[in-house]
Amino acid sequence: MMSVTLATDDIRYMRLALEEAQKAAEEGEVPIGAIIVSRGQIIARAHNAVERLNDPTAHAEMLAITMAVDAIGGKYLRDCTLYVTVEPCLMCAGALRWTQIPRVVYGASEPKVGYHLFADNAFHPKCRVEGGILAAESEDLMRTFFASKR
Amino acid sequence: MMSVTLATDDIRYMRLALEEAQKAAEEGEVPIGAIIVSRGQIIARAHNAVERLNDPTAHAEMLAITMAVDAIGGKYLRDCTLYVTVEPCLMCAGALRWTQIPRVVYGASEPKVGYHLFADNAFHPKCRVEGGILAAESEDLMRTFFASKR
């Protein structure tokens, strides 16, 4: 029962991350969204804002981290889970390492710039990283976005 | 002659980065400073502000990148050099990759969290990365800082 409940929550939070990704798409941003949850409470929701902020570091995960540490009032996210619709890049994996977050759940794999291409050990060894949650939905968003750009 | 001039500039910019690192130390931050130069103009100078901003992503390089893209008005740093007093971590290397910066010069090596421990290919293959510039000065600052924390 426990695992069923957890999986349901994971899907619920990933759906919210997908809603964030959809907002990014509507703003002409690469559609990636992120949610950070602490003990059942959503403490950050963000979407990619590289174009809007004109800042190559304004990925959904980075914005969510800054929002979450602000909400918590400390610089660690030790009891949190981050949900992100696409596999984090090296920068975001490195940032999450600094937060000491114990769990990261992502949707679609990122075959070109995903962290695992560069460093399988980018995350802290104690961080549990799980991919593939609602991956098809995330891939659809990405595919539609990039097709519209061609 | 060319290389002598370049080397002199590198040392001058690294001294400014060390001044930034010194400011960080005075604020109780891990003493790391960064400068970004575009065609002979300094467009960003920043120091580590993790404690002040209570944000684990507020490394000198990340702050300098955001400052520099703001100054340039574009999200790439294609004609820039970043000077940083200590070898970048994985997050900062990943961020610099996104900026397409062609050159990174650092001072001291970072044996515990430097990017090279995780991913030697973290930087773009076209990015020239040079370490060891005024490394002793940077190491002194770091050693003094951590000794004072014990």
Image: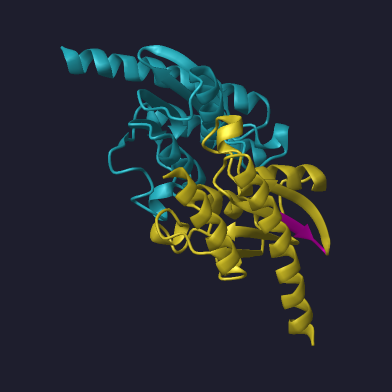
Chain colours: A yellow, B cyan
Residue depicted at x 41% and y 45%: A150
Residue depicted at x 46% and y 43%: A149
Note whether residue A126 is visible: no
Work out whether B133 lies above or below B91: above
The outermost residue toward the bottom is A1
* Dominant secondary structure of the residues highlighted in magenta in the image: strand
Viewed as shown, does residue A5 lie left or right of B11? right
Viewed as shown, does residue B2 lie left or right of B55? left
Which sits in the foreground, A120 or A3?
Answer: A3
Note whether residue B12 is visible: yes
Residue depicted at x 38% and y 54%: B119
Task: Choose top left, top right, bottom left or bottom right for residue A51.
Answer: top right
Q: Which residues are magenta?
A: A35-39
Q: For residue B104: magenta?
A: no
Which sits in the foreground, A22 or B95?
Answer: A22
What is the x, y in percent for residue B114? 44, 47
Task: Choose top left, top right, bottom left or bottom right for residue B131.
Answer: top left
Residue depicted at x 66% and y 64%: A102
